[in-house]
Amino acid sequence: MKFELIQQEIVYAGRAFTVRRDHLRTPREHLVKYDIIEHVGSVILVPVDVDGNLHFVRQYRHAAQLELLELPAGTLEVGEDPAECANRELREEIGMSAASITEIGSFYLAPGYSTELMHVYLAKDLKHDPLEADADEYLDVVHIPLAEAYRMAAAAALLDAKSLAALLLAKEYLK
């Protein structure tokens, strides 16, 4: 299938993302418009301690108007290596660093309208090593046994899609 790009325009440029409108010609010659969120990318971590607990964060998400339980995650800085971002976010969000941090996969968060590619990292051999949290982050760290986290995911008790996807990718590594 061939889609021909006719025109692109920036609709909004903000701190976290840009909204771009693409004008396309479809394979059947229809003219359509797609609004695309341009995002630099992000990381999500599956931090597991020596006792087999996963480290989640509970935080308020205004768009959902809920406090959600999520795996630690964060946005890449422009030009930043995802592994460096993973190490930084681990320290900022749960106050730990990892002796072993391994990329185990990646996925597009919402490919129907966003360019955001999330890189998933398994973090092991954790030690206390905090960095100051971002000014707009209010996080509570929650430790959940591995088996319980997978039970919660299967029971739809975790509402965060990126955390669910990361848990799925990590499952084979955590046996």
Image (cartoon, rainbow, N blue to C red):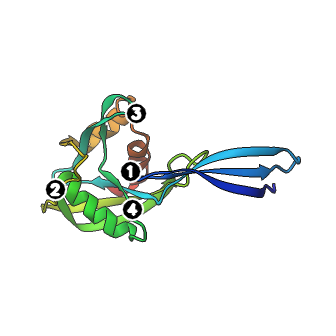
Amino acid, disc 3: Ala
Mark 3 and mark 4: Cα distance apart in space = 21 Å
Secondary structure state at the residue bearing disc 4? loop
Residues packed near mark 4 inside 10 Å, few (<14), some (14 to 19) or many (20 plus): many
Residues packed near mark 1 inside 10 Å, few (<14), some (14 to 19) or many (20 plus): few
Residue 128 screen position, x and y as percent: 11, 60
For the residues bearing labels 2 and 4, Cβ distance under 8 angstroms: no
Q: Quadrant of residue 101?
A: bottom left
Q: Nearer the viewer, residue 175 or 113?
A: 113
Secondary structure state at the residue bearing disc 3? loop
Q: Nearer the viewer, mark 3 or mark 2?
A: 3
Amino acid, disc 2: Gly
27 is higher (above) or lower (below) than 87: above
Amino acid, disc 1: Lys
37 is higher (above) or lower (below) than 151: below
Which sits earlier in the primary sequence, circle 4 or circle 1? 4
Which sits earlier in the primary sequence, circle 3 or circle 2? 3
Q: Which mark is residue 76?
A: 4
Amino acid, disc 4: Leu
Q: Nearer the viewer, residue 155 or 77?
A: 77
Q: Mark 1 = which residue?
A: 171
Residue 85 screen position, x and y as percent: 33, 64
Q: Nearer the viewer, mark 2 or mark 4?
A: 4
Residues packed near mark 3 inside 10 Å, few (<14), some (14 to 19) or many (20 plus): few
Q: Mark 3 = which residue?
A: 63
Left or right side of 30 for 5: left
Q: Nearer the viewer, mark 1 or mark 2?
A: 2
Q: Mark 2 = which residue?
A: 95
